Image (cartoon, helix red, strand yellow):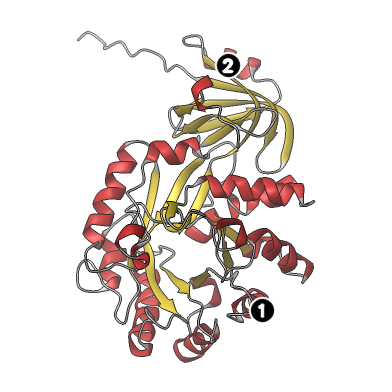
Amino acid sequence: MPQSHVEPERLTVLRVEELWSPSSLGAQDVVIQRDRIVAVLPDASGLLRLFGGPQPRELQAARAIPGLIDLHMHLLGGGDGDGLLGRMPEMSASALFADGVTTVATLLGVDTRFKTLAGLLNKAEGEAAAGLTCFAYTGGMGAEPPSILGDHVSDVALFARVIGAKAAIADPLYDTQVIALEALATQMRQARALTGKPSILHLHVGRGYEGLEPLFRLCDRTGLPPGQAAPTHVNRAAAVSPAFRQGLDWARQGGVIDFTCCLGPQDGSPVGMDPVRAVLEALDAGIPSDRLTLSSDAGVAVPDGSGGFRQVSGGVLMRDVRRLIAAGLSCETALALVTCNPAARLGISGRKGRIAAGFDADIVCLDDSGVVTQVLAGGVVRFTRTCDDMTPE
């Protein structure tokens, strides 16, 4: 019987002058096979000879960092609480790649009536087909968080992309009822036991005067471990909410707190604290850096300075990483907030958030100025900056 001939695989080698994994590794060759990194070496020539096969595809980069992971963003667009003119369009994988984002956790915002969880999952499937790694939260804001299948345990168990549930606290308009919130917390504990998935209770923290107090009460009443609840928008201005100070206490108890990049004066929000200041103050207060994350809230509307609105892009993540480094934070610590820290939060730290052997080949290439020049997601070049893209910031 004739034997079939199988062509040897063609590898990709990314030669980087300065690699941040997110720790600094200097000049490295990153060897990629299909969608995975197989080696990170100062010189991969010997390994490539062992592999044999066709001449590897070669890429060059001045700098490289892991693909950014956005814990909280709106693929369906947001701004629904800002009236009809504030409703923002859907987001695309191509736009996120251009901002260096390769993995997202998406959710519903204020609107859980005209936007649905089924529509959200369908959108996530479409963007995943374009190469973006997409996770989603069931639930949403409002008195009783919606589900897809009738209960949130089933949503987590039966949909691979669903890694937890969203609810709201300290929000006068969209608070989740106490009974519903306690039931949701219990369901997430059950979902984790049944599936082994993170089953995160992802909490929108509004501008209400209670701040994180409902979260502390919830854990006392239900036994929900601090590591399973994830409050976001914790960088509320002290004048409107005690959430930031309470968030430090939450982190001291073992929880993780998420700061929202567009919630602050940088993006015209009078109720937010600059996320850069929030990170620096948290670290100064002795909070371990691995208990902090940054997310974009991309897709929502913020004031455009002319009486209208503009849409927040995924680019605020890279912007605030640069601002943190400019403020004196180490590159490694700043990058961890948007790479390995959120990967741990989402339960994907064995394959995302680092440039290392065995990890997914999600890599952002930068020039000497820190501008994104090329993005690989799943080992495929998804974005390459051209001269037409080089607009002044």
Q: Are marks 1 and 2 in contact (CB under 8 Å)?
A: no
* Residue drawn at x 66%, y 34% as measured from the top left: 370
Residue designated by label 1? 245
SS of the residue at dot 2? Answer: helix
Q: Position of residue 256 (x, y in %)?
A: 59, 68
Instruction: Give whichever of 318, 137 is nearer the camera.
Output: 318
Q: Amino acid at mark 2?
A: Leu
Q: Position of residue 70 (x, y in %)?
A: 49, 52
The residue drawn where x is 31% and y is 55% is 160
The residue at which mark 2 appears reads as: 48
Circle 2 crowding by C-alpha within 10 Å: few under 14, some 14–19, many from 20: some
* Amino acid type shown at disc 1: Arg
Q: Is residue 157 left or right of residue 381?
A: left
Q: Vertically, is 226 above or below 375? A: below
Of the pair 273 and 268, the residue shown nearer to us: 268
Residue 243: image location, x then y, percent:
59, 78
In the displayed structure, would residue 55 be above or below residue 224? above
Q: Residue placed at 35% from the left, 86% from the top?
A: 177
Query: Does residue 112 appear in this view?
Result: yes
Q: Which mark is residue 277?
A: none
Judge whether residue 335 can be spotted in this image: no
Quadrant holding the N terminus: top left
- How many marks overall? 2
Instruction: State whether residue 125 is above or below residue 240.
Output: above
Residue 391 locus on image (x, y percent) = 56, 30
Question: Who's the residue at 68% across and 45% down the image?
Answer: 322
Report the side of 149 relative to 131 (left or right): left
